[in-house]
């Protein structure tokens, strides 16, 4: 063993070691055997001739409480490059300094780390901090220790997420370069894999959105064709019935007039007529028959309105923008959903409050926008099926499950449609995800998670507008559609 302050030269290792107070501190020699004499300032974060900021570099953090280790490491690696990128050095002389530097330089590629600094396990604590608290698993960490007894290699490798363990005395200049290049290659490969994973994730998200749009477009196209066909088939017999009701009522009024005339001129009919009149309850028949025709007339008119709404809603294949009446589209959707507003065993009737403003015709894809109204209103009904909150939409109806629809003009060039319900509302975590494709809070088989995602795409991407939602537990939910006129 060399004596204190003795210099030991080994031509095979091309390194010089200076032993000071039995501490295995080392200094590398350059290629000509000249000992390094430049001092490294404590806390410095760059080396002379560091590359310009515009040049990509590998950041290497040296963590050691011995200034000579910093100086020797820099001299050993100052001409080192990897993939045509130079190294730049950051310096920390304690675990505390290193924590600050790794926070401010998360793109550090490699840490050359001492174990014993301000405490016997300061280096190992730093490893735990980087991996567990900063969740930085990309940076490569090489432990360099001069006191292996304080950090046995076997236990360190098993218990800590480090990438290499070396004694300072075994690292010649060439071995250090080899270890550094290997670590940088590993770091670069990790970055490439993560970038590829990010690209694949984005591609998958885009694919899912496209798939959702295609699925929903196909569903709505099929629905539109079916609804259009049903409306057409219903429309023909409805027109026949509606058109003949007028003539039937005219004939009925004539017959009733004739009966009244007979009663006036023959107040005492023969027994057979009197018996027949009693059997059919003639006075009630004469009173109720006009009411019956009025009901038939109202029913036929309602069927006509439903058919018109179906035909209006089914205009899903109209690919061009045209001026349309927004209120007509909303009313058509409400009429189609009318059966779901009725009271059932679980809740009372859903009240619908319409607060329509004076809107001009709006240039839009009418079928697509009707689809948005259908999705939002259907979700509002689903929410009300689960119960109501104490949010007062109006003082008259707050105790009932209620949907409020309000329209108005904004800044002369935009219209806003607000659809609110007084359901139980949503949590913040749910609210953040409602427009994600395939996200649904409904039971399996009850929803696809596509409705609101497609609605967002229609309003934002197809119409250049905005679709937002506000909600909180116990506060109901409100969707706001904002599109240009």
Image (cartoon, rainbow, N blue to C red):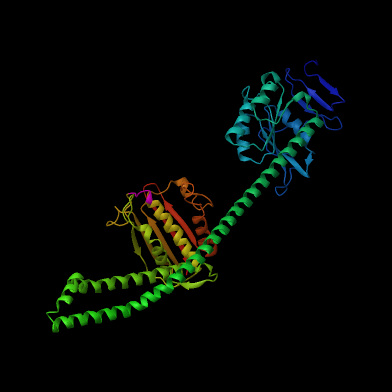
- Write the residue at 76% across / 35% down: 182
Q: Is residue 405 left or right of residue 194?
A: left
Q: Position of residue 132 (x, y in %)?
A: 59, 33
Considering only vertical position in the picture, is 237 above or below 432?
below
Residue range (magenta): 385-389
Q: Which quadrant: the N terminus?
A: top right
Q: Is residue 99 left or right of residue 31?
A: left
Front residue (pair 148, 427): 427
Considering only vertical position in the picture, is 188 above or below 300?
above
Q: Position of residue 450 (x, y in %)?
A: 52, 54
Q: Main secondary structure of the magenta part?
A: loop
The image quarter in which residue 125 lies: top right
79 drawn magenta: no
Front residue (pair 276, 241): 276
Considering only vertical position in the picture, is 119 above or below 236?
above
Q: Is residue 115 visible?
A: no
Tag count: 0
Q: Is residue 274 left or right of residue 340?
A: left
Q: Position of residue 353 (x, y in %)?
A: 33, 61
Q: Position of residue 469 (x, y in %)?
A: 44, 54
Q: Is residue 223 visible?
A: yes
């Amino acid at each position: 063993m060399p004596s204190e302050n003795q210099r030991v030269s080994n031509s095979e290792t091309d390194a010089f070691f200076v032993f000071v107070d039995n501490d295995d501190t080392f200094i590398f020699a350059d290629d000509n055997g000249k000992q390094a004499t430049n001092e490294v300032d404590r806390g410095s974060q760059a080396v002379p001739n560091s590359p310009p900021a515009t040049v990509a570099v590998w950041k290497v953090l040296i963590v050691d409480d011995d200034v000579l280790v910093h100086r020797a490491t820099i001299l050993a690696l100052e001409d080192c490059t990897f993939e045509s990128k130079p190294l730049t050095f950051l310096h920390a002389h304690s675990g505390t300094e290193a924590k600050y530097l790794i926070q401010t330089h998360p793109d550090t590629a490699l840490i050359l780390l001492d174990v014993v600094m301000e405490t016997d396990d300061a280096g190992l604590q730093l490893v735990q901090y980087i991996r567990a608290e900063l969740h930085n698993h990309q940076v490569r960490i090489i432990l360099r220790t001069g006191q292996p007894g304080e950090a046995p290699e076997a236990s360190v490798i098993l218990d800590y997420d480090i990438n290499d363990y070396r004694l300072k005395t075994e690292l010649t200049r060439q071995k250090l370069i080899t270890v550094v290049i290997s670590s940088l290659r590993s770091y670069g490969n990790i970055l490439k894999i993560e970038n590829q994973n990010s690209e694949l994730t984005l591609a998958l998200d885009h694919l899912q959105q496209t798939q959702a749009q295609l699925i929903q477009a196909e569903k709505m196209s099929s629905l539109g064709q079916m609804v259009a066909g049903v409306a057409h088939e219903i429309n023909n017999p409805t027109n026949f019935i509606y058109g003949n009701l007028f003539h039937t009522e005219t004939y009925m009024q004539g017959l009733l007039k004739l009966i009244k005339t007979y009663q006036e001129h023959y107040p005492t009919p023969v027994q057979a007529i009197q018996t027949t009149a009693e059997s059919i309850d003639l006075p009630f028949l004469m009173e109720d028959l006009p009411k019956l025709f009025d009901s038939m007339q109202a029913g036929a008119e309602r069927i006509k309105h439903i058919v018109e709404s179906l035909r209006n809603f089914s205009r899903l294949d109209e690919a061009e923008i045209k001026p349309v009446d927004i209120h007509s589209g909303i009313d058509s959707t409400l009429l189609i959903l009318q059966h779901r507003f009725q009271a059932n065993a679980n809740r009372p009737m859903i009240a619908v409050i319409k607060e329509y403003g004076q809107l001009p015709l709006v240039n839009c894809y009418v079928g697509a926008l009707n689809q948005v109204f259908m999705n939002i209103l259907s979700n509002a009904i689903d929410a009300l099926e689960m119960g109501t909150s104490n949010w007062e939409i109006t003082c008259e109806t707050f105790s009932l499950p209620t949907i409020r629809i309000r329209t108005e003009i904004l800044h002369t060039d935009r219209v806003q449609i607000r659809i609110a319900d007084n359901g139980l509302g949503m949590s913040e975590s749910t609210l953040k995800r409602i427009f994600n494709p395939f996200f649904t809070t409904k039971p399996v088989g009850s929803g696809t998670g596509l409705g609101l995602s497609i609605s967002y795409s229609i309003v934002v991407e197809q119409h250049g507008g905005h679709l937002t939602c506000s909600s909180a537990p116990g506060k109901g939910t409100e969707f706001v559609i904002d599109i240009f006129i």
